[in-house]
Image (cartoon, rainbow, N blue to C red):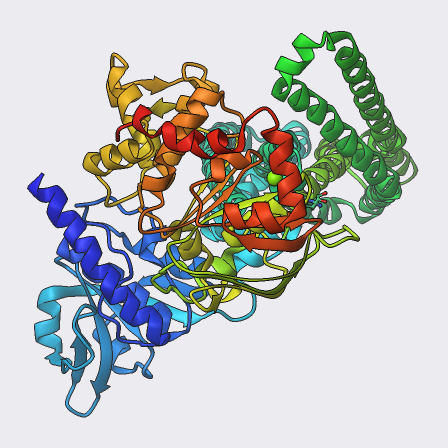
Amino acid sequence: MAKTASTKGDRRVTDETENGVGGTGSDLVATQPPTEPPLSDAAKSRLAAIVQVARHYGAEIDPAELNLVPGSNGPSDADMVAWAKAAGLAADARKVAWRFLLKNQMEPIILLLTDGSAALLSGVRQDENLVFLRDPRSGSGELPTPVDELRLRQIWQGQIILVRPSLGHAPEDQPFDFRWIFNLVMIDRTLVRDISIASIGIAIIGTLPALMVMMVLDKVMEQGDVNTLIFIGAMFFLLWLLEAVLAYGSQIITAHLGARVDTRVHLHLFTRLLALPLDYFERNPAGQTAHRLQQTWQIRRFVTSTLLGSILNFFTLCVVLPVLYYITPVLTWFTLVAAIATAVIVFSYLRPLRRIFGRVVVAEIQKSTVMVETLHGIRTVKCMVLEPQQRDVWDAKVARASKLRLEGYRLAVWPQVLSLPFQRFAERGTLLVGALMAVQDPTSITIGQLVAVLLLGGRLSEPMMNLARVMQDMEELRAAIMMISWTIDNPVEVTSRMRGLTPNFVGAITFDHLSFTYPGSKSRALDDLCAEIPAGTMMGLVGRSGSGKSTVARLLQGISRGYEGYLKVDGIDLREIQLGHLRRSFGVVLQDNFLFRGSIRDNILASRPGYTFKDVIRAASLAGAQEFIERLPKGYETIIEEGSANLSGGQRQRIAIARALITDPRLLILDEATSALDPESEALVNANLKLIGEGRTMVIVSHRLASLLDCHLTMVLERGRLLDLAPHSVLLERCATYRTLWHQQNRHLAPASAQQGPASLGPVLAN
Ligand SMILES: Nc1ncnc2c1ncn2[C@@H]1O[C@H](COP(=O)(O)OP(=O)(O)OP(=O)(O)O)[C@@H](O)[C@H]1O
Ligand SMILES: [Mg+2]
C-alpha cells in the first residue's frame, strides 16, 4: 500500500509540473514529462530526453500515450525512435564515434549511456576536444557538464539517437501502394542483394549443363576425349551440390524477407487503424475493414513466391541470352522474337485483367459484409426468423463473387494459352531451324551446339511462361493493396493526438456560437449554441430524438472537430487541445459499452499505467458497483465473458461508469448511460450521480427527465438549437417543450411525488 500511495503522490506532483509546462506552451527545457508512469531512473531519463528533443522541433510526445512497463529498463532505443517517428519526426538510432559528436552542428543528440540512462548533447568545443552533456531531467538553470573523450568512453559506447525534423512525408504517411511495399522490401536491401546473388548463381549453374552437353557431344563423342568426360562428370557433381546449397540459401533468405515484410506491414496497418478517427469506423462496417486488412497475406505471398521467382527469371534471361548468342546468333534472334511476342500478348491482357480483378475485390467485400452483419445481428436474425432472407442475400453475393472470379481466371488463361506457341517455338522450333541450318551448311552449327540451343531454349521459355503468371499475381496484389489502402489511406487523427495544449482542466464549458453539420448532411445538427456552464456543474441535456444531444457529447470528446464557432473548456477551444490529453481528461459512458474479455478488475483498470487496485475499488464504489462485485464468488477477479453475457445490463453499465471514473476525470459525459436499464438498475446508478458529480463537471444526456432532477442545470435542445438552460423548476415554468416532455413522462405522477422520486431512492445505495 505504501507503494500505491507514493505512486499516486508521484502522479500528482508531475500533474502540477504539467500544468506549468502546458500553460506556458513552449518551454523547451521542461524537466518532467506530463504524466509519468512509475519507472526506473534510467528509463525516466531516456523518456525525458526523447520528449525534450521532440519538443525542440515543436512535436509533442505524450508519455501517457506510451505503453511503458513500470519498473522496466525500457524504453529501448527502438521505442524512442518509433515515438519520435509517430510524432512526425525523422529519427534514427546509430552507433557513432567521438568525432561525430565533435562535428555536430548543434543538433540535439541523445546519447544512450551504458547504465541505461540518457544524456543530451548541448554543445561542443572542438579546439579543446570537449563535448557538453546535460541530464535531460535537470532544470534549465543547471550548467552542462564538459566531458572529454576518455571520460565519455567510460559511460558511453557510441549509441546515439538522432532526431531531425522530417523532410516531406514520413514513410508512415505515404499512400499505401506498390511503391510503399517496394520501399518496405528495400529496408532489407541486403537480403534482396543476397537473394539476387544466389539467383545469379543458380541461373549460371542452370546454364552450364547445356554447355557441358555440348562439350560431350562435340569433344568427347567426336574426338573420344575421355579426360574431358571425367572432368565434366566431376563438374556435374559439383554443380549439383552448389545448386542445392544456393537454392536452400535463397529459399531461407526469402522466407526471412517475407516474414519481416509481413511483420512490418501488420504493425503499420494496426497503428494506422488505431489512428483513424471514430468517424471512419462509424461509416465503415467492421467486417469490411477486417476483410480489407486481411488481404495482407497477399503481400507476403507475393514477396515470398512471385518476387523470388521473378528475380530468378530475370537473371536466367540475363545469363542464358548472351550464352545463346555466343553459340548461335541467328537462333538467338528467333528466341528473342518469341519472347517479345509473349510479352506483347501478356501486356495486352493487363487492362482487362485489372478491371475484372477490381470487380472481384468489390464483390468479395460485399460478401464479407453480409457475413459480418449477419453475425453481428445474429440475435435479431434468429428472433425474427430472418435466416432464409439472409441466406438468400449471402447466396447471391457468393454467386456473384465466384462468377467474377471465374471470369477473371478464364480471362487470365488466355495470355497463357496464346503465348504458348511462341514459348514452344523458343523451346523446340529452334531445333528445326537449327537442323535446317546444319543440313544446308554443316559448318554453321555442330550437333552439340544444336542440342545446347535446345536445352537453353527450354530454360528461356520458363521465364516467359512465368511472365503471364506474374502479371496475374501482380493484378491480385494490386487489388489487395487497393483494398487495404481504402481503409488505411483515410486521414488519421495522429497530428491532433500529438500536438496541442495539455492544460489541467477545471471543467468550465463554453458554447460560443457553436454550429455543426455532419459531413454529407445538409441540415445543421447543432445550430448556433451559446451557453456558459461553470465548472462543477451537473448538467442535464434533454430534447427530442435527433435534437443534437449526442452530437454535443461527440464534440466534447473531440470525435468530430469540424465545427463552427467555439467549444471551449476553461476558455481553450477544444481544437487546440491535444486529443489524447482531452480524451484522457474526460470520462465517457455510452448507452452500450463494450467490456473486454478479462476480469472485472482489468476492465476497470483498462491497463492504465499508474493506477492500482485501490483506485479500482474507489471507482467501483463511486459507480455503485462495489456491492454487486463483492457478492460475486470471485469478486473483482470474475472473468467477463465475450459480449458480457454473464453480467446484467445494470452491472455492465456500472462497470463502465467505474472504468470512466478511475482516472478521476474533470468532465464526465453520460450519453443515455442508463436508458437501457430497468428502473431499479437505473435508480441505483442515478442515486450515485450526485456523489459521482462531486468535484467534476457532468453532462448527462437522458430521455428520462426524472433522472435529471438532481442536476444543477438542464439544457433543452430542439433541432440543434438551444431552447433553454435552467434548473428543473424554472424550466417547468418557462420552457414549453420541457413542460410537454415532463408531462408526457410523468402524467401518472402527482407533481410532488415525482419531485421526490430520485431523492427517495437515495438510501437504496449507500456508497
Ligand atoms: N453520423 C452521422 N452522420 C450524419 N448525420 C448524423 C449523424 N449522427 C447524427 N446525425 C444527425 O444529426 C442530428 C442530431 O443527432 P444526435 O444523434 O445528436 O441526436 P440525439 O439528440 O442524440 O438523438 P437521440 O435522442 O435519438 O439519441 C440528427 O438529425 C441526426 O440525423
Ligand atoms: Mg443520442
- Give the residue displayed 18% in from the left and 68% down from the top: 137
- Give the residue displayed 67% in from the left and 41% down from the top: 283
Residue 249 as seen in the image, left or right of residue 134: right
Quick one: which residue is furthest to the bottom in this view?
127
- Give the residue displayed 56% in from the left and 58% down from the top: 173
Quadrant of image for the N terminus: top left
Q: x, y percentage for residue 98?
A: 21, 75
Q: Quadrant of residue 654?
A: top left
* Of 95 and 612, the residue lying toward us: 612
Q: x, y percentage for residue 555?
A: 56, 53
Quadrant of image for the C terminus: top left
Residue 71 as seen in the image, left or right of residue 220: left
* Of 299 and 645, the residue lying toward us: 645
* Of 505 and 538, the residue lying toward us: 538
Q: x, y percentage for residue 737?
A: 67, 44
- Give the residue displayed 42% in from the left and 65% down from the top: 570
In this rendering, does residue 312 appear at all? no
Q: x, y percentage for residue 472?
A: 76, 35
Q: Quadrant of residue 94?
A: bottom left
Residue 144 as seen in the image, left or right of residue 318: left
* Of 275 and 150, the residue lying toward us: 275
| Above or below: residue 479 compared with residue 396 | below
In this rendering, does residue 214 appear at all? yes
